[in-house]
Image (cartoon, helix red, strand yellow):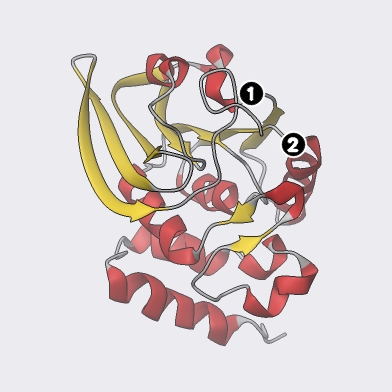
Amino acid sequence: MEDPWHIQREHMIRHHLAARGVTSPAVLQAMREIPRERFVSPSCREEAYADRALPIECGQTISQPYIVGLMTQALAPEPGHRVLEIGTGTGYQTAILARLCAEVITIERFPALAFQAAERLRDLGIWNAFFLCGDGTLGWPHGVPYDRILVTAAASHVPEPLWEQLAEGGILVIPVGDRERQTLEVVRKVDGRPCWYPMIPCRFVPLVGQHGWNEE
């Protein structure tokens, strides 16, 4: 049966991703395989492949495809990696990571979002992602160390628990700034110290938790 979303998905790959510097074959293939239309609200489904953030439940958003691709490429996940994701949202980023690495542990503070995301991935036959509900700024110490950590909400700094849980030589990708404007940062742990690589200005919902922002 022909996929009615195929043309829109290919347009996203060619124009929103590859043409703007997201060129990793593995990342592009993962984003080609994951049906983004299944991860957006029904009212926004016709805009599933538009290159902009879309609102979801609980006052959160699903990031624009370019940002998802850029963050995934910067994270550089490999098939044997264990990845910690902070901020599950709809599970779209989780599904892409699961296609690229051995295991994803993802933490979401809203139970409804975590449950829905888990259901979506199970429906797609993705079984190497494990869902937790709680304060993402604390990470998940029971699974340390992590080869990669991806934070999909804005922080004023890298939460100390996440830094401690990152493996030596590992990479952490996080938006850092104030509540309104941030810079997407790539942080590599080298000899226990952070090496920062700023990427682009961005805007994410705030990272709320003990080592993040207070909920307003």
Pick whichever, 51 or 122, lies toward us. 51
Residue type at numbered disc 1: Asp
The disc at residue 110 is 2
Q: Earlier in the sequence, mark 2 or mark 1?
A: 2
Which three-letter amino acid code belongs to the residue tagged 2?
Answer: Phe
**Front residue (pair 160, 32):** 160
Residue 158 picture quarter: top left
User: How many numbered dots are placed on residues in this image?
Assistant: 2
Residue situated in front as seen by the camera: 164 or 33:
164
- For label 1, the residue is 135
From this viewpoint, is residue 139 visible? no
Residue 77 on image: x %, y %: 38, 42
Helix, strand or loop at disc 2?
A: loop
Q: Looking at the picture, how far across and down is residue 70, in whole percent?
A: 36, 56
Q: Quadrant of residue 174?
A: top left
Percent position (x, y) of residue 10?
48, 80
Q: Residue at x 62, y 42 (%)?
A: 88
Q: Which residue is located at x 28 percent, y 33 percent?
A: 187
